[in-house]
Each structure stands twice: as C-alpha cells, then as structure tokens.
Image: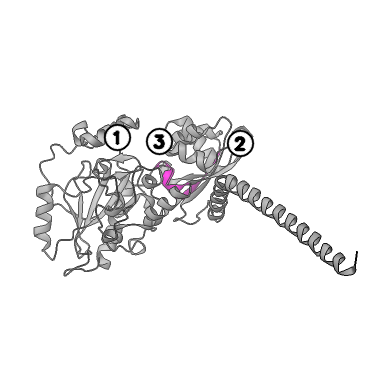
Amino acid sequence: MNPRTHNVLGRERTCRASIRILRLLLLCLVLAAGRAGAAEPAERLQQIRDRLRQEAGAYQPPGGDADLPLVPVTVLPGDSHRRLAVELAGTREAEALLLRIEPQLATGQRIFVPRALLRPQLSDPRSEPLRLDAAHRTLWSLVSALPGTQSAGTAATVRNVQRLNHIVEPSRLPKGATLLVPRGLLAKATAGGPVLAVDRRYRVENIRGLDRRPTADEFPAALRGQLQRRGVWQDQFKPRRVDLVVVHTTEHRGAPLDNVARYMNRNRLANYLVGRDGAVYEIVPEEYRAFGCGDSLWEGRYEVDHEAINVELLADTAPGEHQGDILAAQYAGLSRLLDDLSARHPLLHSGRVVTHRMVAFSYAYGTRSRKGDPYTFDWAAAGLPDNSVVIDQDVLLGRAKLCTDQRYSDRVTEGQTAAARFQSAL
C-alpha cells in the first residue's frame, strides 16, 4: 500500500468515526429533550414553589408587610389538602389549588398560602401578641376565649393559630409562651374613641327587602345551575355577617350632592355617602344591605351586598368631560368612617376594604371588569394598604375570568392579573 492510499483510507476511517460520534451525540440530545419534556410539568411546579418561598421569605409576623399576598403556615399532624382548604380558606374549592402548590404534605412542613384565600378572621395582616398565663394555661383555653373563634369553630381556630405560629405540638409550649394572633380574632375596642358625626337627612325609611340573608330568587337561573353543579349552591345561604367594605365613586357627571343623595335614597344604593368636604351621610342603615354592588362575586360569595357595607365617594373619576379627583377631605372622611365601622364590626380591618371594580362580576359572561369605579383611588391617602394588588381569590380558583377586552383595560386590577398568571402557570 503506497502512502497516498494509506492516507485516503485513514481519512475515510476518521470520517466514519466522526459520523458515528455525531449520530450518538444526536441520539443523546433527542433522549435528553424527551426527558426534559417529560419533566417540564414537575419543573414548572418546582419553579412556582420556589417563587412562593422567595416572595414569602420577607414575612415578618410582628408587623411585616401589610401588602404581602402570601402567608406561611405549618402543616399539622392529620392535615390533608381538604382539611387545610376548609379550615384556612373556608371553602372546599381551595383544595385543588393547594394540591397544585404542594402535592405532598408532611407534618412540620411550611407551605405558602395566598392571603386572599384566608378566612376574614385570619386575613388581617396585623397581629397582636397574647401570652399564656394563669387564666389561660393552654392554647385551647386562650384561643377559645377569643370573640372571632365562634364563626369557624373552636377546634379549627386553635389549629389555625398553631399553623400561623408554626406550633406542631402545643403540649410542649413553655409556661408564659407568647403567640401572635390576627386582630380579626380579637374584640374591637369601642370606648374612648371619637364619635363619628353622621348626617342622616337622606336616610332611607323603607327598609323592606333589605335583609342581609340572600334568597334563591336573587340568583339568575343560569348562575343557580352552575353553583349547584359545583356543589356550592347551599353555601350561598349561610348566615352572613358584615366583613367587607366596598368603596365606590358616584360618577355623577357634576350633579350636586342633594340630587345624588336623593337618587341613592330612592334606589337604596349605598350605606354611606362621603361629600366633597368629607362629611358622612347615612343612606341605608348599616344593619341592612344596600344595592351598591349589583352582580358581584368575592371569595366565592355572590351578591356581595349581603355582607358588604357600601360607601360612595362623591366624585367623577371616570375618564371624560367631568373627570376629577377624590379630594383629601374625602379620604380623611373615609378614614374616620372606616375606623368607626371597624370598632363595631369584629371582622372588618384594613385588609377587608375593596373597591367596586374588584368585586364587580358579570353573571352572563363570568368575567371581572363589569365596573371600573373608582377609576383612581389613593389607598395610602385613605390610610390603607393597596388591596388591589393582592391575588384575586376568585380568578385564582377559576370562579371568575380575567377580562381581556382592551376597551376595559383600565378596569383590570393588578391582583386580577397576578391571579390569572398564577392560574395559567399551574
């Protein structure tokens, strides 16, 4: 074999070897891609859990960030996804979401629950320290004495306090141990505060039909069928207590206060009206519901007026000829009114104040953004955390859809968008 022939054969062998190596590499890439595709759902879930942990990492129980949408809770012995859904959120519909966030539960494990899912008594971002003492030597004795315990049941509330304080074995609590309890479980002080001056010249006299307990004929037939199929129809008729304030703007196009107030009186549209000078006018007595929200949904309850106090601010905030701002005097008047309401209704706190656009819902289309008022609202000026950024529970659990029509983009809240993204990621 001459040297030329030897070189040609050598190059051919090298070429064939290179081709075999390339084929092997290609096969490895295909197999790796297949494995990555198969693992993608698990990886996405892990990314979601990592993001939840990262966002909740800044949680500070003694005060913390009032706007934080996620709360860490500890899994107790015997906890299941169903039990956590019922006791923490008060609804079985939250079970599917908890399953997707943490498919496996282990005693002592911390999971991160959107604050919007928590019961009203637990969702208060403010906490008070309570100490075991001679009068209350055990966790059970301490918690069962709290006024906000009754609506959820003593045993469930004790477990919820354990979960929030990360106590797996309450029998091992040392004497004098201090617990942090959401203010929603505590009695509100009513003595010693200033008395709110309320003008009652526009007060409704005819309160017939304004009971806070809903009746079946208030639900459209199509909606009734949907709720029955989901197994939550009877939940709509549980006794309702005031645990929400819904803030509206009148969008009255420059009409004087007297005209607006008389219109609200005739149609029984609000419990309170706040004038441009901050004066507070009573329309429908707060023991009764006003027809302020109309078709609405909040935390799985339709016809939100049955548990909400509706407050109207005399202002034109919608874009157009009469557009204006809510005045500083009105924010001050609203703040005084909220303090007064919170002193008399144990479930009300700063986290239970929402706007009309947040609760408005189309029964026909199943979407948010039926209303946009108030189109502008300065939460800080009202002395409130920005509750519009907190995850919308109903969008998160699939009860409501995000409005994607660009004509109504100014009615979509950040909390609705965040919930829709979270829902699609899961």
Residue 72 falls within the magenta-colored stretch? no
Which of the pair 35/85 is nearer the observer? 35
Q: Quadrant of residue 273?
A: bottom left
Depicted 195 relative to depicted 84: above or below: below
Which numbered disc, 2 or 1, marks the residue that appears first in the sequence?
Answer: 2
User: Mark 1 — residue?
Assistant: 226
User: Which residue corresponds to the image point at 20% horizontal and 63% vertical from the top-left?
Assistant: 315
Going by the numbered disc 2, the residue's amino acid type is Ala
Is 372 situated left or right of 84 in this image?
left
Question: Residue drawn at (36%, 56%), measured in percent from left and top?
Answer: 388
Residue 311's x, y, as percent?
23, 53
Q: How is the image coloured?
A: one colour
Q: Earlier in the sequence, mark 2 or mark 3?
A: 3
Q: Which mark is residue 106?
A: 2
Q: Is residue 313 visible?
A: yes
Q: Which residue is mark 3?
A: 91
- Front-lying residue, 118 or 332: 118
Q: Amino acid at mark 1?
A: Gln
Q: Secondary structure at mark 1?
A: helix
The quarter holding residue 412 reads: bottom left
Classify residue 318 by image quadrant.
bottom left
Instruction: Determine which of the numbered discs, if any, sits on residue 54 in the image.
Output: none
* Horizontal and vertical percent position of residue 333: 26, 60
Closer to the camera: disc 1 or disc 3? 1
* Magenta region, residue range: 114-133
